[in-house]
Image (cartoon, coloured by chain):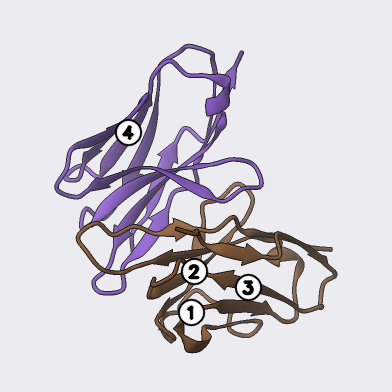
Amino acid sequence: KQEVTQIPAALSVPEGENLVLNCSFTDSAIYNLQWFRQDPGKGLTSLLLIQSSQREQTSGRLNASLDKSSGRSTLYIAASQPGDSATYLCAVTTGGSARQLTFGSGTQLTVLP
Amino acid sequence: EAGVAQSPRYKIIEKRQSVAFWCNPISGHATLYWYQQILGQGPKLLIQFQNNGVVDDSQLPKDRFSAERLKGVDSTLKIQPAKLEDSAVYLCASSSGTGLVYEQYFGPGTRLTVT
């Protein structure tokens, strides 16, 4: 059974810092890995999707890497801003024809002004 | 393109009452998912539909939860009777289920509070 772990559970940083969020998964047989952002009381916003054949994806100040063989992914946020404060969730897609997402518990990020 | 729609956005009920949630997926998406997200945890899959058939409901508490997807479009999730531990956000997602890039799109969720 696939398990996804995110460390740390919570993180507080001053504005302007670069930071790294970590995600690990137990079964390397994945189709892709996604990073989501979730604001309080809201749904999920997809930030980056990395296919299993890719090593990284970039969008603006965000960069996500994937090492499938070791079961690890990192989300790098450059020059953090207070507006980046949210919970960040990592999820992997597994399965055959019935593809499913397995989520980690998330990292709650607070960027202090 | 319109996103995944859910209603209601918020619901407060007493334990042992019943409640129903509605989801309208992105037009043309064959696969629909219901997730339960308890505070401080990641979403957990409850049920997955492919068109109007159930693909996986292994984590659905079938003694109190039920779901249907009539005509392979809209879906409803029902809880009867509700327990305190059902307090959570219920998320609906949809996917086209085709192509090399598989991606799920999420609705805004329904926040359920059971008192």
User: On what subunit does the disc labeled 3 rest?
Assistant: B
Circle 4 — which element?
A: strand
Measured along the vertical axis of the image, is residue B95 above or below residue A36? Answer: below
Can you identify the residue that label 2 sits on?
B25
SS class, disc 2? loop
Q: Please name the amino acid that badge 3 sits on.
A: Trp
Q: What is the distance, in whole Å, between disc 4 and disc 1 at their CAs? A: 36 Å
What is the spatial separation of the Cα atoms under label 1 and label 2, in whole angstroms?
Answer: 7 Å
Residue A52 screen position, x and y as percent: 19, 50
Circle 4: residue type = Thr
Name the residue that disc number 3 marks: B22
Q: Which chain is purple?
A: A
Q: Chain of mark 1?
A: B
Please rate how many residues cluster around mark 4, counting C-alpha atoms within 10 Å: few if below 14, some from 14 to 19, many from 20.
many
Q: From the viewer's perspective, is A22 left or right of A11?
A: left
Tell me whether marks 3 and 1 sit on the same chain.
yes
The chain letter for the residue carrying disc 4 is A
Quadrant holding the N terminus of chain A = bottom left
Which amino acid does the dot numbered 1 rest on? Answer: Val
- First reached walking from the N terminus: tag 3 or tag 1: 3
Q: Residue A71's image quarter?
A: top left
C-alpha separation, residue under disc 3 versus residue under disc 4:
35 Å
In front of the other: label 3 or label 1?
1
